[in-house]
Image (tube, helix red, strand yellow):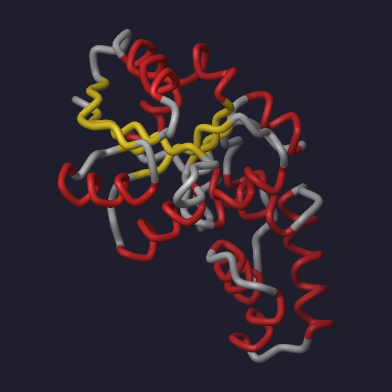
Amino acid sequence: MTIRILLVDDHINVRRGLREMLSRSPEAEVVGEAEGGKEALKLTKDLDPDVMLLDVEMPDMKGYEVARHLAESGCSTRVLALSGYDEKRYILGMFTSGAVGYLTKDEAPEHLIHAVEDIAAGRKGWISPRIAKRLGIPPHPVGRDTIPALSPLEMKVLGCLTEGRTNKEIASILEITPFALKETIQSITSKLGVKSSLEAVLRAMQEGLV
């Protein structure tokens, strides 16, 4: 199976390096390159790639803006965020905007091909070993049967969190009090073995809960 890939980064040398890495896989085919978010959105419509390698910081649009636009448009292209940053706000911001994977640029030589193949095959919540260690969660799915069952309300809250909604918005949508929402989120994070609601989103994506 050929995996059609769109490279999105404002530095031409980075794109050249990514092409070189991907050329080592017989399944990977780079079908286009964009140096900014607006160009990336246009090329996505024209080329319909399977996977977009998306830089997080670009001059015209942020990576999360591109990912969110694709998600809201119903585009089937799967986004792998490729960034020089390993800070939580960047990682979790990309996931709540629609990305399905996150890889730091300095880890790309070792993990890029594996990440692209996994994501093209349908994997969500793909993270590199370094990111997993930073977030304190497993780098790979360990099985939904290892997670205590979530209640219907917890699943609804988790779904809203995955959409990037604020606590105020969630409480209004689900018609529950802020206190009840806080308790529900605490229960979710406890069951998923994470420390924050955003980390819960990523863990749930890994295990196919959302």
Residue under the image location 70 percent in, 48 percent down: 89
Q: Image height check: is 77 above or below 107?
A: below
The percent position of residue 98, horizontal first and vertical second, equals 47, 54
Q: Image height check: is 135 above or below 208?
A: above
Most foreground residue, 162 or 72: 72
Q: Image height check: is 191 above or below 155?
A: above
Residue under the image location 59 percent in, 86 percent down: 173
The image quadrant that residue 182 belongs to is bottom right
Q: Image height check: is 147 above or below 172?
A: above
Tell me how many marks there are: 0
In the displayed orientation, state which residue is furthest to the top. 24
Is 193 left, or right, of 2 in this rendering?
A: right
Residue under the image location 68 percent in, 55 percent down: 198
The percent position of residue 8, horizontal first and vertical second, equals 38, 36
Query: Which quadrant, please, contains the N terminus?
Result: top left
Most foreground residue, 58 or 154: 58
The percent position of residue 147, horizontal first and vertical second, equals 67, 50
Most foreground residue, 128 or 207: 128
The percent position of residue 93, horizontal first and vertical second, equals 61, 52
In the displayed orientation, state which residue is furthest to the bottom. 175
Residue under the image location 58 percent in, 33 percent down: 127
Most foreground residue, 30 or 161: 30
